[in-house]
Amino acid sequence: MNEQDCIFCKIAAGQIPSDRVFEDDVCVAFNDITPQAPTHILLIPREHVDSLDKAAGVQKEMLGHLLLTAAEIARDKGFADDGYRVVVNTNADGGQTVFHLHVHLLAGRPFVFPPG
Ligand code: AMP
Ligand code: ZN
């Protein structure tokens, strides 16, 4: 994936608008444009990485940061106690459609397991 053509790189850079809920030096979190639950937030690293499959040891801190930030957003928004789901779709069978690593944070309804 060419970073210049990457929609999530453009969102991180502010070149494409998004409904941001959180941002810091490492990541940006914004509402999914096609929500699959009452709350559906995407967390993306500012750094372009195609997928979890392409992440390497040097991204260990960034990956941990994404998960901890998801948990922090869940607490801040008040749905941590009820519960939520964190998903990282990876490659074709995983259902990944945007090839810039992202974490889905879903909440506001019960989720079944395993997912479809
Ligand atoms: P995935 O299928 O795991 O790659 O997830 C990609 C997600 O990005 C989907 O849930 C889309 O609805 C979402 N998405 C795509 N374009 C945008 C956008 N411009 N703003 C917000 N969310 C988007
Ligand atoms: Zn990107």
Image (cartoon, helix red, strand yellow):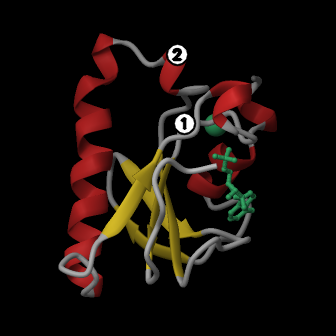
- The image shows residue 109 at horizontal and vertical percentages of 46, 81
Q: Are marks 2 and 1 in contact (CB under 8 Å)?
A: yes
* Quarter where residue 73 is shown: bottom left
Ligand 1 lies in quarter: bottom right
Residue at point 35%, 68% (across, down): 84
Residue at point 81%, 36% (across, down): 5
* Quarter where residue 89 is shown: top right
Report the quarter where the N terminus lies.
top right
| Amino acid type, callout 1 | Leu
Beta carbon of the mark 2 residue lies under 8 A of ligand 2: no
Of all residues shown, which one is farthest toward the right? Answer: 5
> How many C-alpha atoms fall within 10 Å of the one at disc 1: few (<14), some, or many (≥20)?
many
Residue at point 44%, 83% (across, down): 108
Question: Which residue is the site of mark 1?
Answer: 101
Beta carbon of the mark 1 residue lies under 8 A of ligand 2: no
For this rendering, which residue is in front, 82 or 97?
82
Could you give the CA–CA distance between mark 2 and mark 1, rounded to whole angstroms? 9 Å
- The image shows residue 82 at horizontal and vertical percentages of 25, 81
| Amino acid type, callout 2 | Lys
Q: Answer left or right for 1 relative to 41.
A: right
- The secondary element bearing badge 2 is classed as helix
> How many C-alpha atoms fall within 10 Å of the one at disc 2: few (<14), some, or many (≥20)?
few
In the rendering, which numbered label is found on residue 54? 2
In the rendering, which numbered label is found on residue 63? none
- The image shows residue 54 at horizontal and vertical percentages of 52, 16
Q: Is residue 20 above or below residue 114?
A: below
For this rendering, which residue is in front, 38 or 115?
115
